Every structure is written in structure tokens, then in C-alpha cells.
Image (spheres, grey):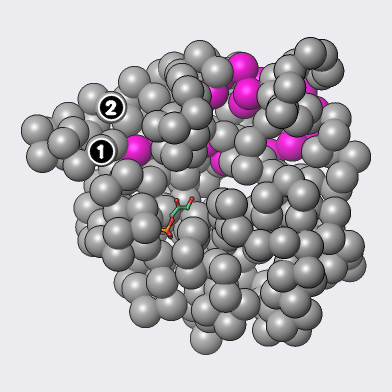
Amino acid sequence: MSQTKRRRVIAGNWKMFKTQAETRAFFSTFVPLVSASRHCSIVVAPPFTAIPAAVAAAKNTNIAISAQNLHWEKEGAFTGEISTGMLVEAGCRYVIIGHSERRQFFGDTEETVAKKTKAALAAGLTPVVCVGEHLSHRESGQTHKICKAQFDGGPGLLTPDEFSRVLIAYEPVWAIGTGRTATPEMAAEVHKFLRQLAAEKFSAKLAEALRILYGGSVKPDNIKGLMAQEELDGALVGGASLDAKSFASIVNFTS
Ligand code: 13P
């Protein structure tokens, strides 16, 4: 299938960075730099406290706001957690689920990733479900095995209709925050594998429509090479999304 049929998504994951004031400052520089960009969907994921400031700053622009996590219950005695209803009311349209930092440091598992993904979809949010192997997995030839387990235990459990509304982000853990990007060919190889899993589990049609983003040390100077790969339907950018000019130049990789 030709690339043009899958709309690309360039998303910034701010992780635990930026206050509300810093968020407003970011958007005042960023919005004019990307307002003419039509070739991709643009998403920014601030920390929870900065979501309202981001939503206000992105109002009437081509930028959508994402959360970085959620809880699957609608409400309850879950100290420190945020529900889908709260995110929707705040103006979020996307939510990142199962980021490797959450799997590694905060106990996210295949099971909670699946629950969170279903809850996000039920609330009308677009989940960006993250998968990816650690360096030891890659070095011992287990990349496919790990990605398959994460796919099967998460997006693979959805109904076909639910699956059609999910984005997947392939983020090799060894490439996150290390400056060590997967080569475009390495990323494309895993994307192809994930697409094949989607075809086997669901259908060729849903697999062809599935958007898979690459994440891990994406920078203004490597985005073009990565996006030259037809298998890569966009990027999930960490560090380089914190600076408005740098993230805008990633978004505007075609110019
Ligand atoms: P970096 O771009 O800082 O490597 O982070 C990638 C990431 O984890 C995005 O979710």
C-alpha cells in the first residue's frame, strides 16, 4: 500500500517536564511554526498539570493534546490516578499507554496496558500503545519475541473495531534518551513484523491501515531518514519535543 493512505502522526512526549508557564511559552513559539503543516497530525503530551494550559494554547490550531497515562476505572479510591473522563473533560484526544518507563518503573504490565487501552477507546480517546525491547533482548535475538508478547497481551486482545482506532509506537528501550537511534532499516524491520502480527490477528486491511510510530532519540537531523521508510507512520519524540523550534523542525521534516 502506498504511504499516502496512512496519515502520519508526529507526537511529542514531554514526560515529567514543563510547568504551566513553560507550556504556554512553548506553544507561543510552536504554534506559528507548524500552523501551515498539513502533511501529518501533530500531538503534544504534557504532564497532567499542564494539560489545561496546553489545551487552551492549542485551541483552534492543528495540534491535538495527549495524556501520558490513565487509570482504567471511571472513578474510585485510587490515590494519584486519573480517569479517562477527567482527560476527555480536560480536552485530551490521545493518551500514551504502556510507555517503557511506565512498564519499567511504575509496574505497567501487559494486563494493565490492555485494560487501559480498552478504557481509553471506550472514552473516545486514541491510545498510543508503546512496545519495544531492551538492549539485552536485541542482543540475544529476542526483539520479535518481546514485541509479539507485548502486542498479543495488549492491542492483540482488542476487537477489530477497537484495533482500528489504536496507534502503536515502537520504542526500542535502548534508543530512548540515549542518542542511540535505531537505524531506519532496523525500525522498519520491526514495524513490518508488528504489521504482520496485526494481519495474522485481525486482517490484512486493518494491518495496512495501522499506524506505527517510531520512538527513540528522534531528532531534527534524523527524522528525514526515518520517515523515508514507508513502514514508519510517524514519530514519538521525547527530549527533542521539549524545545519548540526543534520539535517544529521535526514536524516540518518535509520542508
Ligand atoms: P527520546 O526521544 O528522548 O529518546 O524519548 C523517546 C520516548 O521515550 C518518547 O516516548
The amino acid type found where label 1 is placed reads His
Query: Furthest residue to the left?
Result: 140
- Direction from residue 92 to residue 68 in the image, left or right: left
Task: Indicate the position of residue 50 as horizontal and vertical percent values.
Answer: 76, 55
Q: Can residue 220 be seen in this view?
A: yes
Residue at the spot x=60%, y=58% of the render? 17
> Ligand 1 is in which quadrant of the figure?
bottom left
Can you identify the residue that label 2 sits on? Answer: 146
Asked whether the beta carbons under mark 1 and mark 2 sit within 8 Å of each other, the answer is: yes
Report the magenta residues as a range.
113-132
Gap in angstroms between the C-alphas marked 1 and 2: 9 Å
Residue at the spot x=49%, y=24% of the render? 108
Can you identify the residue that label 1 sits on? Answer: 134
Residue at the spot x=63%, y=43% of the render? 68
Task: Indicate the position of residue 153 as horizontal and vertical percent values.
Answer: 44, 17
Q: Does the magenta stretch include residue 128?
A: yes
Task: Indicate the position of residue 15 as horizontal and vertical percent values.
Answer: 56, 51
